Image (cartoon, rainbow, N blue to C red):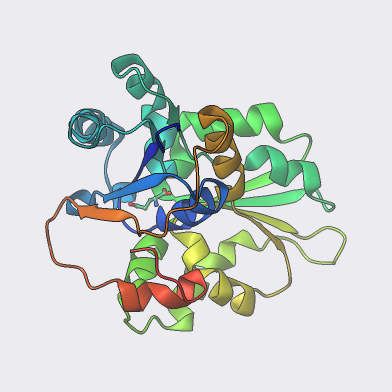
Amino acid sequence: MLRPPTILIFDSGLGGMTVLREVVAARPDARYVYVADDAFFPYGHHSEQEIIARVVPLIGELIDRHAPDLVVIACNTASTLVMSYLRQAYKIPFVGTVPAIKPACAQSQTRRVSVLGTKGTVQREYTRGLIRDFAQGCEVTLVGSPELASLAESALSGHEVPDRAILAELAPCFVGSGETSRTDTIVLACTHYPLLLDRFVRLAPWPVNWIDPAPAIARRVADLLGPAAGESRDERAEMFFTSKKPHTLSRALAPFFGGRALA
Ligand code: DGL
């Protein structure tokens, strides 16, 4: 029988869990290692040079330690910078997470789309290139949020996060007025944001489509790995935190993952 693959999912923190959730659903037979580089969180506050210098050697160490068959960089702030360096340095398949601008613009009816990401992600040349290539005539508003990823981490750790703090970051995404010309589609360009999606939907001044790239990432992983190697495994992902701080996540994660915490 084929050996079940090991998939390593990497993020600056817990946002990659939103990608892990979808990848597990697509490949329930795989073994999962989840690494949060929380010692360096938030990535959105670091320069491009700092992120490249941090992530490229760290992924090399993780490959040596965990021998994955595939690595998912479940972080837009890192993926929009490091994928070509990783592919050059290491000979295993990588799947990145980048703003889903193409599908968002393809489905917008009002031709007004917002991209909500970290300040780093919205400044990247890579993101600008996606808009040049795939906006398909849509007006795209880039919204760099300084605090949302940290607010999502706080919510996951069981802290109270006030509505006004979330709304302050969200409000610039809503542009225009009148049902036929205002923003109707928002790209969740940071893997932390789907953790707050219920709050976003409730606080939004009008209904929009929220685009989460995680299902497409999961499909890409499944395509690269080929057919499943066996039965579903029931074990949880092994989790590692670069800070080595103790985390008591299971209880806090449960509401975000339909009652079944993955860690
Ligand atoms: N989850 C990360 C992303 O997708 C970034 C959060 C951060 O570390 O700033 O961009």
Q: Residue at x 22, y 53 (%)?
A: 240
Quadrant of the rendering where the N terminus is positioned: top left
Counting the numbered discs, the total is 0
Answer whether residue 224 is visible to the viewer in this image. Answer: yes
Q: Is residue 169 left or right of residue 203?
A: left
Q: Is residue 106 left or right of residue 263?
A: right
Q: Position of residue 104 (x, y in %)?
A: 70, 46
Q: Residue at x 74, y 61 (%)?
A: 176
Q: Position of residue 110 (x, y in %)?
A: 83, 53
Q: Position of residue 86 (x, y in %)?
A: 33, 23
Answer whether residue 144 is visible to the viewer in this image. Answer: no
Residue closer to the observer: 84 or 186: 84
Residue 84, above or below 143: above
Residue closer to the observer: 47 or 156: 156
Q: Position of residue 178 (x, y in %)?
A: 84, 67
Quick one: which residue is furthest to the left in this view?
A: 244
Q: Is residue 78 left or right of residue 179?
A: left
Quadrant of the rendering where the C terminus is positioned: bottom left
Which of the 4 quarters of the picture holds residue 61? top left
Q: Residue at x 55, y 49 (%)?
A: 214
Residue 229, above or below 182: above
Residue 209, above or below 53: below
Q: Is residue 214 left or right of residue 181?
A: left
Residue closer to the observer: 95 or 195: 95
Quick one: which residue is furthest to the front in this view?
A: 1
Which of the 4 quarters of the picture holds residue 234? bottom left
Residue 235, above or below 89: below
